[in-house]
Image (tube, grey):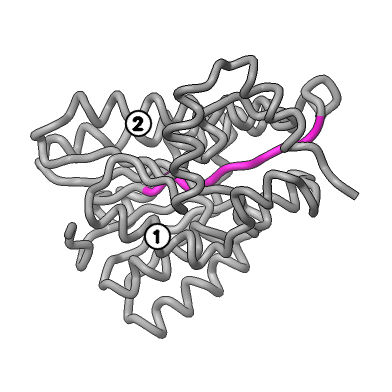
Amino acid sequence: MYEVKGKNVLITGAASGIGKELSLLFAGDGANMILDDMPEKMPILDQWAGELKSKFGARVWTFGINLAEESGAETLYRSAVEAAGKIDILVNDAGTLAYGNFADIDYQKQDFMVRTNVLAVFRLTRLVLPSMLKAGNGRILNMSSCSAFQPTVYHAAYAATKAFVQSMSEAVNAEIQGTGVKVLTFSPPYTKTPMLKDGNLPQKMFWYKISGLWDPAVIAAIGYKSFKRGKAICIPGAVNWFMHSIVVRLSPHSMLSAISLRAMKGQD
């Protein structure tokens, strides 16, 4: 089990959802927390930081840096190192989602999503990795999704961003075997977080009956346990694991797209 006590953990998207729940688990095990979210969420993030300090005596630094901006990732990286001295663990949790027909979803909203879900993850991973390799110790946990493993109708661009994260993370993790550093992925199913509401996902969808609609605290606990064990890939739930690890690999893409078209459509 990977020891996190005394280590500096940078978590993006930490003001709510899975990121917030993960910060609770890390702080509970004695880690120092570097938390980031959008500038407008700073009051929420600062309040949460106060709770972590009070409950666990954790050292906590907070930042309100928009990772979709061109210099966002670099600014956060420099600010975190300046404040905490180093980053031992990076959790790339920040992300957005947009539901609907690809041609109808606002262009700027999708562009923001690609910059947050792809470029920010790429940049932060690339920025922190060299120092971890030099130290011979470190962990990067990149938040992927069950959507990463197949085309996902009605949020096509979102699924594509997660496919990038999944592929990059697995490849880099293979490159650095034996260095003491690992790049891990966490691929949860649909989870009741503000991202789903902000992304305009339907409240009822056939796929929920298969994969479920999970609680963020439960998902975070599964991901945290997998992280500490050093598992390269974690897909919560036996049904989800079977569907996305086995069925997807054995099915033609034309069939997957047809199934997705029906399963991802909102229901009255």
Q: Is residue 85 left or right of residue 67?
A: left
Q: Quadrant of residue 182?
A: top left
Which mark sits nearer the N-terminus, 1 or 2? 2
In percent of width and height, residue 175 lies at 20, 24
Q: Residue at x 42, y 53 (%)?
A: 11
Q: Residue at x 60, y 55 (%)?
A: 191
Residue lying farthest right? 268
Q: Which mark, residue 6?
A: none
In percent of width and height, residue 178 lies at 8, 34
Residue placed most toward the observer, 210 or 34 = 210
| Residue 188 versus residue 26 in the image, above or below | above
| Residue 136 versus residue 166 in the image, above or below | below
Asked which secondary structure carries label 1, the reply is helix
Asked which secondary structure carries label 2, the reply is helix
Q: Residue at x 17, y 29 (%)?
A: 176
In percent of width and height, residue 168 lies at 37, 25
The segment highlighted magenta reads 91-100
Q: Which mark, residue 222?
A: 1
Q: Quadrant of residue 114?
A: top right
Residue placed most toward the observer, 32 or 110 = 110
| Residue 179 versus residue 76 in the image, above or below | above
Residue placed most toward the observer, 160 or 32 = 160
Q: Main secondary structure of the magenta part?
A: loop
Q: Is residue 184 left or right of residue 101?
A: left
Residue lying farthest bottom? 54
Q: Residue at x 28, y 38 (%)?
A: 183
Instruction: Pick the quarter of the image with the N terminus.
Output: bottom left
Q: Is residue 254 left or right of residue 182?
A: right
Mark 2 neighbour density, 10 Å: few (under 14) some (14–19) many (20 or more): many
Q: Which residue is mark 2?
A: 169
